Amino acid sequence: MLIKTVLITGASSGIGAGVAKAFAMNGARVAINFPTEREEECCLVCT
């Protein structure tokens, strides 16, 4: 099985967050990047 890894920049909200979640739900390993550390952005990693 081929495992895809993607890097999503600007994944804290909006389109970036949606794209990161969609890749994760379809089995990809997702690395996200965003400019600040707010609680809701940290939650994106856990969900």
Image (cartoon, helix red, strand yellow):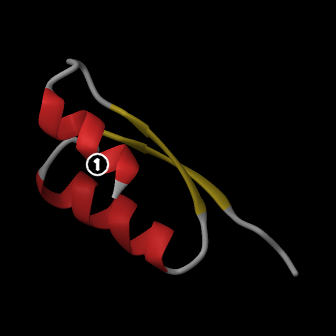
Query: How many labels sit on residues?
Result: 1
**Residue drawn at (37%, 59%) of the image:** 20
**Residue drawn at (22%, 37%) of the image:** 41
Q: Position of residue 10 (x, y in %)?
A: 27, 38
**Residue drawn at (57%, 53%) of the image:** 6
Q: Position of residue 45 (x, y in %)?
A: 38, 45
Q: Position of residue 28 (x, y in %)?
A: 60, 67
Task: Check the image and name the residue furthest to the top.
Answer: 36
Q: Is residue 25 above or below residue 45?
A: below
- The answer to whether 8 appears left or right of 43 in the picture is right
Q: Secondary structure at mark 1?
A: helix
Q: Position of residue 37 (x, y in %)?
A: 22, 19
Residue 15, by quadrant, is bottom left
Tell me, yes or no, if residue 19 can be seen here: yes
Residue 25, by quadrant, is bottom left
**Residue drawn at (24%, 55%) of the image:** 17
Q: Is residue 21 above or below residue 40?
A: below
Amino acid carrying label 1: it is Leu
Tell me, yes or no, if residue 10 can be seen here: no
Question: Where does label 1 land, which residue?
Answer: 44
- The answer to whether 25 appears left or right of 15 in the picture is right
Identify the image quadrant of the N terminus. Answer: bottom right
Identify the image quadrant of the C terminus. Answer: bottom left
- The answer to whether 11 appears left or right of 15 in the picture is right
Task: Check the image and name the residue furthest to the right.
Answer: 1
Crowd rating for badge 1 (residues with CA inside 10 Å; few <14, some 14–19, many 20+): some
